[in-house]
Amino acid sequence: MTNRSLSDIAREIRQDWKIVDFRAEPNLAAIENMNSINESYAVCEDHDNLPMTEGRLIVTLFLELSRSWQGATASRIKTELYFMTIRSLSEIAP
């Protein structure tokens, strides 16, 4: 199974989730600017003064904060993101 880029997934989320929950918005905005879950990204506007956040954590937080997004597309994409995080963890396991 080929992984789509996170930015492609974010684009589909934006198309389906018409009113994004304000709590999930910063993480979705970060995902829009990432290709891989293995990248890091500064979630806040002040990129120069904040440490980078692992893509895995950004995706995990998005999954937690996107519970109000429901439906077939939401379920499919959340499953895709969940398995993407699991695969990324298995790549770093000893």
Image (tube, grey):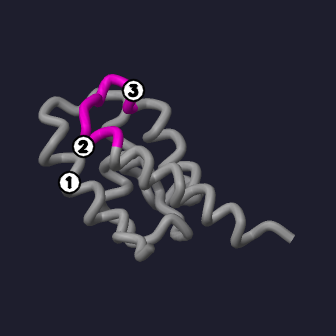
State the image coordinates of residue 32 (x, y, percent, origin top left).
29, 59
State the image coordinates of residue 75 (x, y, percent, origin top left).
35, 39
Q: Which of 21 and 1 is in front in this view?
A: 1
Q: Is mark 3 on a helix, strand or loop?
A: loop
First in sequence: mark 3 vs mark 1: 1
Q: Name the residue under label 2.
A: 73
Q: What element carries label 1?
A: helix
Residue drawn at (40%, 44%) of the image: 78
Q: Specify the label residue 94 is tagged with.
A: none
Give the alpha-carbon distance from disc 3 to disc 1, as whole Å.
Answer: 17 Å
Q: Name the residue under label 3.
A: 67
Tell me whether the residue at label 1 lies in contact with that at label 2, contact meaning CB atoms closer than 8 angstroms. Answer: yes
| Front disc: 1 or 2 | 2
Tell me whether the residue at label 3 lies in contact with that at label 1, contact meaning CB atoms closer than 8 angstroms. Answer: no
Q: Which amino acid, mark 1?
A: Glu
Residue drawn at (36%, 50%) of the image: 45
Pick out the residue farthest to the right: 94
Tell me whether the residue at label 2 lies in contact with that at label 3, contact meaning CB atoms closer than 8 angstroms. Answer: no
The range drawn in magenta is 66-75
First in sequence: mark 1 vs mark 2: 1
Q: Name the residue under label 1.
A: 12
State the image coordinates of residue 80 (x, y, percent, origin top left).
42, 54
Q: Is residue 1 above or below residue 57?
A: below
Secondary structure mostly seen in the magenta stretch: loop
Give the alpha-carbon distance from disc 1 to disc 2, as whole Å.
Answer: 9 Å
Q: What element carries label 2?
A: helix
State the image coordinates of residue 28 (x, y, percent, origin top left).
33, 47
Compared across the picture, whether 88 is left or right of 47 comes to right
